[in-house]
Amino acid sequence: MVDKNLKLYLPFDDPDGNKAYDFSTSRADAILSDGATFTRNSKKGKALSLNGGECLTAQTIPFSGNFTLSAYVMTTQSRIGWVVNLLGVENYREQWIDVVPKQWYFIAFVRNSDTLSVYLDGERVSIVSLGGGNPQGLSLCTDELLTTTATIDEVKVYDVALTEADIMKAQANNDVEYYIDGVNFKDYGVSVSKSDGIIGRLAQKEALQVDYDNYHGIVRDRKRKRYKERTITLDCFLEASGRSAFVEWCSRFMALFDGDGTHRLTIEYDGKAKPLVYEVGLYDDTDITKTWGTYNTDLMVGTFKLKLIEDEPVKRVLRHISANDNSKASIKVTSSKLLNIYWGDGTHTYNVAGNDTVVEHTYALAGEYDIIIAGVIEDIEKFETNDIVIWELLK
């Protein structure tokens, strides 16, 4: 679901380069310059290392109304500060606080009516009056005079004042969430205790080989490796309030895998910006181990394994975000190998190939859609899109 109050979201988990994708509906992608880079020394995935440089986006903080700005910050200095500029000469609010160098902190600025509250790791450490006016600027500072070597991650700007509970939730580490076709397993009382096959090296297909009788060993073709299908096994358990509910929830959950075509498995392991996504099928039977409750109202728990197969395991993953209906995704690709595109709304386009081939898709409803491009991704010669590249290569 699209959060229309989220006006900027820079997770900085992008492919190395000078662009930081905005995962909000604003799509105000930021540009890195003057030494700013992505670093893996981060709170979540990658982060932005300023190195005295800049990261510029066209999106601005909505100072004329309520807003929330949050981010993770790490500095080599022993304190950080913030300055709020107000209308007038020498009219500002400033505060500094001691921190541990090279340690990550979650900081949030919340403007609610005439006050600005500052939260550090979920605790409110400052509340100042804005004197009846709107802020003119807001800066987060270190003791470095000319430049900053601070590292920043997960920058979010909202056009509403988040509550203290919202701030705590934003900082909290979330569970790993499993979805099938956009439906959370937990909505059916199902949790995953263990997973196999979601990451790691795929099994390689047998390569061409020649066995000469007058030579030791064999001669094997070591070029252009190709891989077998992916097998994903999820160890699951289902809780229900009684026997009838247990049977009903089991039936309804298994029915999610019915229907034609493949099904989209999504695993959110560290927020929503960079999930693992797979187009899978459930082809084996699934036996549920359970013990019937003594009474129909007894809590019942059953365990089972889901064996899911992904036929096309090598892929590129994009994200399309729009707050409007009938938005369009566009891909321009040059590839001599056939590619299959799964648009994330249950539709697909097969056998895409050729020189500068343009493929477009219209989404009837607003939302977020993860697009899978499956095939010999390594042989794509040219690629352009108006969407976010989440994974250049996922296998």
Image (cartoon, rainbow, N blue to C red):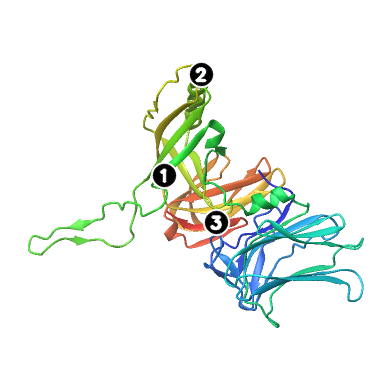
* Tag 3 residue: 390
- In space, the residues marked 2 and 3 are separated at their CA atoms by 42 Å
Does 214 sit above or below residue 272?
A: below
Residue drawn at (73%, 48%), measured in percent from left and top? 4
Residue drawn at (59%, 73%), measured in percent from left and top? 101
Does 168 sit above or below residue 39?
A: above
Look at label 3 and name its amino acid: Ile
Locate the N terminus and report the quarter of the image it occupies.
top right
Could you tell whether 265 is left or right of 209 in the image?
right
Q: Which residue lies furthest to the left in this view?
A: 214
Mark 3 neighbour class, 10 Å CA radius: few under 14, some 14 to 19, many 20 or more = many
Q: In which quarter of the image is residue 386?
A: bottom right
Residue 114 screen position, x and y as percent: 87, 57
Residue 244 is tagged as: 2
- In space, the residues marked 1 and 3 are separated at their CA atoms by 22 Å
* Tag 1 residue: 195
Q: What element carries label 2?
A: helix
